[in-house]
Image (spheres, rainbow, N blue to C red):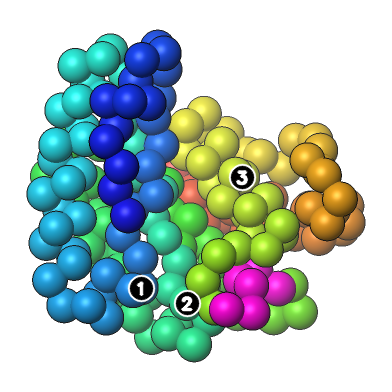
Amino acid sequence: HWHDVKAYLKKKYDVVVMLYTTTNSFLKGDAPQKDTEALKKHCADIRAAGGVPMIMMPWAKADKQDMMTQIADHAIRDANANNIMVAPSGLAFAKCLKQYPEIVLIQKDKNPPTPAGTVLEAAVIYATMFKRSPEGYPYVPIGVGTEVDDATVAKLEKVAWETTKAFFQWK
């Protein structure tokens, strides 16, 4: 869903990271086009306020992993059309689900991320913004139920860096 970005831009932000479209959008038919139009408008608003827009590629729902290529292609196309970076979070989710199936990234309702999924998202955004590995970056839980053990955090940070490097073809 897209909110009025102008309300959020009353404060000065260097970078505004937006979660871009979801599996649900693709299941609804015309939603991706609406997302494309909204992204163009929000990028203009963010730039007018002095910020740099960026999108976070979403992940496919747990039971819709076959849609990841479609979601990624849509996000990349729209990011390129708006001259913005895209953090490849969805691709990192897909890689992690294959490489570490024991790590639960998506909640039982198949869409919002778990605390581990949030760690992975943050690590991908960090890697994308700063062009450096998030490995070893300290993870601080924000409350009860958000804890992720150190070994899992290390795996997630490694997947985030490997995915981001491959996506941008960095060495």
Task: Name the element at disc 3.
Answer: helix
Amino acid type at mark 1 = Thr
Spatial distance from mark 3 to mark 2, Cα to Cα? 20 Å
Indicate the quadrant where residue 66 lies: bottom left
Is 58 placed left or right of 31 in the picture? Answer: right
Among the two numbered marks 3 and 2 on one chain, the one whose residue lies closer to the N terminus: 2
Disc number at residue 123?
3
Question: Magenta residues?
Answer: 104-109
Q: Is residue 166 magenta?
A: no
Residue at 34% x, 80% y is 67
* Mark 2 to mark 1 CA distance (whole Å): 6 Å
Residue 15, placed above or below residue 159: above
State the residue position of label 2: 61
- Do callouts 2 and 1 mark residues in contact (Cβ within 8 Å)? yes
Q: Which residue is mark 1?
A: 23
Q: Residues within 10 Å of mark 2 (few under 14, many from 20)?
A: many
Is 168 or 154 nearer to us in this picture? 154
Q: Amino acid at mark 2?
A: Lys
User: Toward which corner of the image does residue 6 lie, by quadrant?
Assistant: top left
Question: Going 26% across and 15% down the picture, which residue do you hit?
Answer: 49
